[in-house]
Image (cartoon, helix red, strand yellow):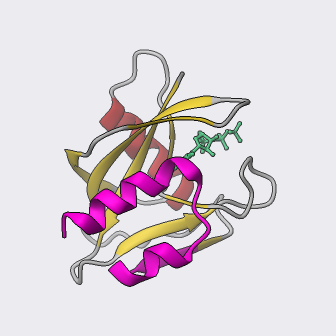
Amino acid sequence: MINVVCAVIQDDDGRVMACQRSEHQSHAGKWEFPGGKVETGEDPRDALRREIREELGCEIEVGDRLPEVKHDYGDVAICLIPFVCRLGEGAEPVPHEHAAVRWLEEGDFPSLDWAEADIPIWRHWIGGQ
Ligand SMILES: Nc1nc2c([nH]c(=O)n2[C@@H]2O[C@H](COP(=O)(O)OP(=O)(O)OP(=O)(O)O)[C@@H](O)[C@H]2O)c(=O)[nH]1
């Protein structure tokens, strides 16, 4: 089981950032929350800040942890750990690895083709809003 952290980044209008995996990544074309694998011994929040710097070239403020989702893709099983986040002061995210970035309103979530592990996360998110 691989621990993967992801960021539910909220803006001031309550919209949330979603990223589309690019064609040279696994699960190409699927939408996800930005993040990545936690390295051995790494604090999950530090891992998330590191991944967001790599993927979006910016700083985030990492807040509350949301319920994790365990999902077996067959070739790999992950434990996906989401955190509620905000962009850092003056941050301007630029996708370095993803094919696209979108800011979603509540009604937008069901229309995207999500990575399977992410579906319980956004359902929990919009259920709690
Ligand atoms: N970052 C991220 N990864 C996710 C999410 N949902 C989900 O199933 N994953 C999966 O978790 C795994 C680890 O993510 P990663 O971004 O570090 O993967 P990677 O491209 O470096 O490695 P990989 O291509 O070998 O899988 C991938 O298999 C990815 O598809 C998510 O919301 N965010």
Residue 96 or 123: which is nearer the viewer?
A: 123
Above or below: residue 84 compared with residue 93: above
Q: Is residue 87 visible?
A: no
Left or right of 4, for residue 48: left
Q: Is residue 116 visible?
A: yes
| Ligand 1 quadrant in view | top right
The rendered magenta stretch, by its main secondary structure, is classed as helix
Left or right of 73, for residue 42: left
Q: Which residue occupies 51% across, 47% down?
A: 117
User: Which image quadrant: the C terminus?
Assistant: bottom left
- Residue 104: x %, y % from top left: 41, 79
Left or right of 53, for residue 91: left
Quadrant hosting residue 19: bottom right
Quadrant hosting residue 97: bottom right
As for residue 43 lying within the magenta part, the answer is no
Q: Which residue occupies 28% across, 68% down?
A: 126
Look at the image and give the residue range highlighted in magenta: 101-129
Q: Which residue occupies 57% across, 62% down?
A: 114
- Residue 36: x %, y % from top left: 52, 41
User: Which image quadrant: the N terminus?
Assistant: top right
**Number of marks present in the image shown:** 0
Q: Which residue occupies 49% across, 59% down?
A: 57
- Residue 25: x %, y % from top left: 75, 50
Above or below: residue 100 compared with residue 2: below
